[in-house]
């Protein structure tokens, strides 16, 4: 008995649940959990089933495709460790939170390596026996630096997710295209809000009473893309921007780690600029 | 085309989703939304489907029962206004929140009347043209008073839900049995915590940094029963217990109104001391 | 023995607390509560003391002014009911929340009247015996309509605060200037975020996982101005924008009522685009 | 120019702020921040001032004592690194969060060592170059084990705070007395709630919709004592107790780290079973 995650998203039609579940029934698969959602505005159908049983993957996939609408997205995934690469700059809070979880066996992933444009965090990462690669941007154009980062990433082979754990460089559309819907970022602010440098200073100056952070996929623009998770804390006039930043780091790390877990468990569907999360 | 809510809870077995959805398909019913959950600890299956189409209720019910396990609970509900009765004592915040929603047409219910052991809130309720009944407990034993309340309630005919909007009298098991899983209460505290008189004073004395409220069904004991909704606010040393109470009232009214809406939309399944909420 | 609120904001200097408290001591005033804050970025000092005793207001004020820096703002306020006017359009949730609190004696204010550009909410307001004034904008230019609203407001005499309880018209700088730092608004979104029409639809389309509301003073622009209070709720993909709006209304009303209470208790200092709240 | 934290708590009397601030003024001390609070129920006065200047500590203390009521608590503290010892059992999340902050220089403390009743976390702690001591409880009575732990702790010399970062052994009143108001604990639940083993399982079985954690000082009983910080997350029926526990760990570590920071910054006053936190 093995477990599989069956992930479907497609145009909605009458009978989809029936058709899919009849095939599960035929293959004697037990549904351990099942989530569906129809977005009535776009008429899209989303389904994530965790099933257990014995399957010949190809036949199940073929039969499912036969009953699904044209252009349906279908994935049948075994719950195995995914390969991830972390990218960081100088701050250690989001990285550290992932490392501690990794060490505790809480992260269902292999961290292939950590890439940074500085070597500041090398000592921390090496404590955990993870390869560290510095790709300095000094003296390089944005494109040239990114090309070097892409080469460094290419050397890892197949990467399931790239986690930007406070990587403070803007990525070009070219980079993003190579890893479409595979790059997770933590944005040091709500979205949409305070885009740009030092958002905590901006938030302080605006006199906000709440600060937050947003984990999202990166599409084209570092600060845009489908939102996965957000959280907030209340602040007041007595918080200067450095204290907002310190509080913000606590939100950032929890929100990013949550997004990473959701991705590793294949719980996220992306459509347009939105996500369905089961 | 009409809408129906199909509500199933039963022992889990392989193929339930398939069997139920095949009957929906046969009757040409379109699934507008569908939620399932299997509690793996108790092996119970819960399903709430909103379907649209034309049905002969009896036949659909018969066919569904034929494929469901023995002793399955099955309800097919038309989304019509439910009949509710409110019970209050002296505080107006939870009552007022429901009245304003009622006036705005936000509450999918007919408020048949409001019953109280004091006449203090009569002027407020009469503004909204709702019948008000005082059943004073003065000079009566608990049982005798409750008997009078039961008679007052019986005169309303069929009641879907009784909403205790800060009704500060303890109900006996006898009373609760008459309206099993039909009585919603707002508890002025977390559960389990600070059971008894003046919970905000207790919370203050304990020096808590968070206060909350709990909406729940009443089973046997006023302060027990399956939890529907909870919420909290942060407090600090500068909040005396009166201020905690004032903050608490804001939580109470929002949490109770939310629970009432969930009940009116048939979104709550009760099993043992727990709820599944879709 | 009477209570007074002494409110000071001025340039910070060494010894301010000492100088102020020595005058309280000289006048035999008991400090019931005391809050101070120095904004080190702007070098501004804020102080709110609640004192009890017998004072000849003029002399206390004179002596305090003598020890405070030039251009200090000083107010000595008796905790009496303030005069407020509500402005609304068509939605009743924020208005209703204030009315229920008013009826319960929870609001330390006289509601002089409610002004609206529609007559839709007249029946609700009249239940509470509060004068209602319709100032329709039909067929009028923005300036002409606002002129009529200003005339309507002028007839109330002295107004401490105007509460925009979902008043959906943009106010001109001219209007705002007349009631500078006296207009409270509830913004149906975070600030800064989703400014403009139907913010819940914008939030839905952006795929946010958190929605919120902001109470603020109105300065020049309806959606700008010093923030008083904010709150949020988590949402997910299953919330369409109408459901976000319904949840949002619950946040809006609580946040606005909180801001009104803070204003009535003289707890808010405004400086630039920020507030200090004690 | 040096900074000092002046911490006072005593019976309230008229003129305390004046008397204390007049001494600051006399010594030419600049008040950088000042917080006071009077608990009107107990008539206790609390004050925390951060001042800068040059002081002869003894004289300032003597003069302050002269104006304060009898039995006043007075501390004048230089903001130096405090000495702390961590105690753990098998879980790494709270410990790891502290280690990452320590490594980043965010924790204003020297971690003298980590003491555990198991050696499981030794590899993690040694990565950070911190001494680790296993004091196994195997084959020992509670008292004998505690005696050995006390000896281990005594060898560190002066300890400012002992942080129980998921130390899962109950401490006896004898132990607690040695380090009164110096032991910080993270309780895996609200207080008061679900005291005892596996609180997440208890919470799951109770069907709660919110889980939380509490950081507190340990007085006599592991699960009691003055509360410092609490936080919560919403859960629903789909969270089994293992998932509640995972979510709970995220709350626990943030709440504990926050409490540690408050303690290191001398922001906490304890009185009876309550805290004042500035």
Image (cartoon, coloured by chain):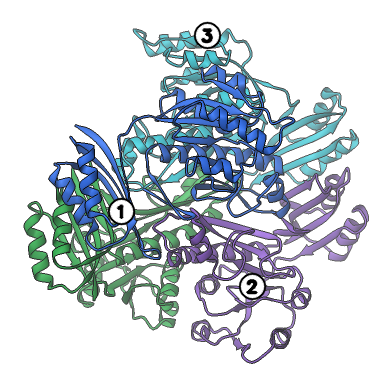
Chain colours: A blue, B green, C purple, D cyan
Identity of the residue drawn at 35% across and 9% down: D138
Both labels 1 and 3 in a single chain: no
Q: Viewer-proximal residue, D68 or D214?
A: D214
Q: Nearer the viewer, mark 2 or mark 1?
A: 1
The single residue placed furthest to the bottom in the displayed view is: C139
x, y percentage for residue A199?
67, 47
Report the residue marked by disc 3. Answer: D152
Circle 1 residues within 10 Å: few <14, some 14–19, many ≥20: some
Label 3 chain ID: D
Q: Viewer-proximal residue, B245 or D131?
A: D131
Instruction: Quadrant for residue B264, please give it.
Output: bottom left
Identity of the residue drawn at 67% across and 70% down: C222
Report the residue marked by disc 2. Answer: C163
Q: Is residue C53 left or right of residue D27?
A: left
x, y percentage for residue D217?
53, 30
Mark number displayed over residue A36: 1
């Amino acid at each position: 008995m093995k477990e599989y995650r069956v992930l479907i998203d497609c145009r909605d039609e009458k009978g989809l649940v029936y058709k899919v579940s009849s095939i599960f029934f035929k293959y004697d698969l037990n549904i351990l959990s099942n989530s569906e959602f129809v977005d009535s505005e776009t008429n899209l159908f989303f389904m994530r089933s965790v099933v257990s049983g014995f399957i010949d993957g190809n036949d199940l996939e073929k039969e499912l495709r036969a009953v699904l609408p044209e252009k349906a997205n279908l994935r049948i995934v075994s719950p195995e460790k995914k390969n991830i690469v972390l990218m960081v700059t100088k701050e250690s809070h989001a990285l550290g939170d992932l490392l501690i979880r990794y060490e505790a066996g809480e992260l269902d992933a292999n961290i292939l390596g950590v890439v940074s444009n500085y070597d500041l965090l090398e000592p921390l990462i090496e404590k955990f026996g993870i390869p560290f690669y510095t790709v300095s941007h000094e003296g390089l154009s944005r494109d040239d630096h990114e090309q070097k980062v892409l080469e460094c990433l290419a050397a890892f082979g197949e990467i399931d997710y790239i986690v930007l754990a406070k990587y403070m460089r803007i990525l070009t559309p070219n980079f993003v295209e190579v890893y479409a819907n595979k790059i997770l970022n933590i944005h040091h602010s709500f979205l949409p809000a305070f885009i740009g440098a030092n958002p905590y200073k901006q938030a302080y100056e605006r006199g906000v009473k709440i600060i937050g952070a947003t984990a999202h996929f990166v599409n084209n623009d570092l600060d845009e893309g489908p939102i996965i998770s957000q959280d907030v804390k209340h602040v007041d006039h007595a918080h200067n921007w450095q204290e907002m930043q310190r509080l913000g780091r606590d939100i950032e790390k929890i929100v990013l780690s949550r997004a990473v877990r959701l991705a590793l468990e294949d719980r996220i569907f992306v459509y347009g600029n939105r996500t369905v999360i089961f």
